[in-house]
Amino acid sequence: MDIFEKCAKATEYESGLKESGYYFFFRKLESPQDSEVVVNGKRVVMIGSNNYLGLTNHPRVKEAALKAIEKYGSGCAGSRFLNGNLEIHEELEKKLARFFRKEAALVFATGYQTNLGAIPALVGRNDVAIIDRYDHASIIDGCRLSFGQVKKYRHNDMKDLERVLEGTKDKDKLIIVDGIFSMEGDIADLPDIVRLSKAYGARVMVDDAHGVGVLGNGGRGTAEHFGLENEVDLIMGTYSKSLAAIGGFIAGPSEVINWIKHLGRSMIFSASLPPSLVASVIAALDIVEEQPELRARLWRNTHKMLRGYKTLGYDTGTSETPIIPILIKDTMKTYQMCKLLFENGVFVNPVISPAVPPGRELLRTSYMATHTEEQLDKVLAAFEKVGRQLGVI
């Protein structure tokens, strides 16, 4: 047997998808990430991005990045642990800690690396990580790198969470949950999670990648949304959604953050975040605080699209956020819809097994504060035309 044999089979499958026009991955964008993008020379409405507040092309964000390059150069040439710790990294950490009302924060090079570093640092050999079955892949992989036990509970099922907690009463426990689930668009039942964590002596970490900038009066995410900022122990997030860059952070008690800072291997053994990106995040955080009207527009657009899809007869599952899945429940029709929607001027993401369970194939749509009424009406018209054409509605 040849270890490379599986690669050839995968390439054959990929070639077949490309020949049939159903390969929708690594699509090449020729314009900024905005409410409209250019793909292969065609301008389309973008409803497949996590750019919720539309800040990736904001003049203040771009200006901040350019100024940081002028002052610090293009990179750090090493890990923060040794030679790559710039003053601007620490400035961002102070800003994040203040924004999320925590004692301290720690910056990582990516959101993925944040979970890969923080979870194994905290969950040791005799500990238990408890996760929702729909948690993000980075949480799952972070748990795999730990030496602790990993227990899963059914999605947003508090009775099942209590069952898991009951079975681990004699262990130190960390419940790790997405604030907003990235495929379903629903929100974690954080009030009951916090209640159960206190009853069973567990700590709570919220991965709020999709909640930051979106939920809460101040855009501080799921904990603020439920009034639980003082009850959630750790808040983890990314910059690649509302904060217009790339990178990640974790915020919480200073002693815990300091522990992760000295044991988080994904930070210690990775080069530090480039200064241009750090400056972009600082500028984006300022905009989030100064312009709540962006969040208001985002939610107006979200409610418009939820109503629109339901009126057309689409199944949007349990979504209550700017992530709106359109459940197709058939792989080929999901691909067909994606292709026809693109032909009608709409960029959308197809999601099939194993990213979702078989029989739950969907189109993942997501919305921005900067989408116009005209753009959203165009999207709904395309979904009506294509849905009727394929007999989905």
Image: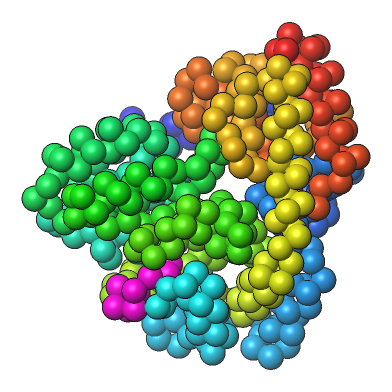
What residue is shown at x 26% (from left), y 63% (from top)?
122
Front residue of this view, candidates 133 and 223: 223
Across and down, in percent, residue 140 comes to: 36, 46
Query: Quarter-wise, where is residue 188 in the image?
Result: top left
- Residue 274 vertical placement versus 238 (above, below): below
Query: Quarter-wise, where is residue 388 in the image?
Result: top right
235 displayed left or right of 366: left
What residue is shown at x 39% (from left), y 36% (from top)?
156
- Residue 122 vertical placement versus 153 (above, below): below
What residue is shown at x 59% (from left), y 38% (from top)?
320
150 displayed left or right of 243: left
Which stretch appears magenta? 250-258
The answer to whether residue 59 is visible is yes
What residue is shown at x 23% (from left), y 59% (from top)?
123
Front residue of this view, candidates 83 and 262: 262
Front residue of this view, candidates 77 and 53: 53
Magenta span has 254? Answer: yes
Across and down, in percent, residue 270 comes to: 44, 71
The answer to whether residue 350 is visible is no
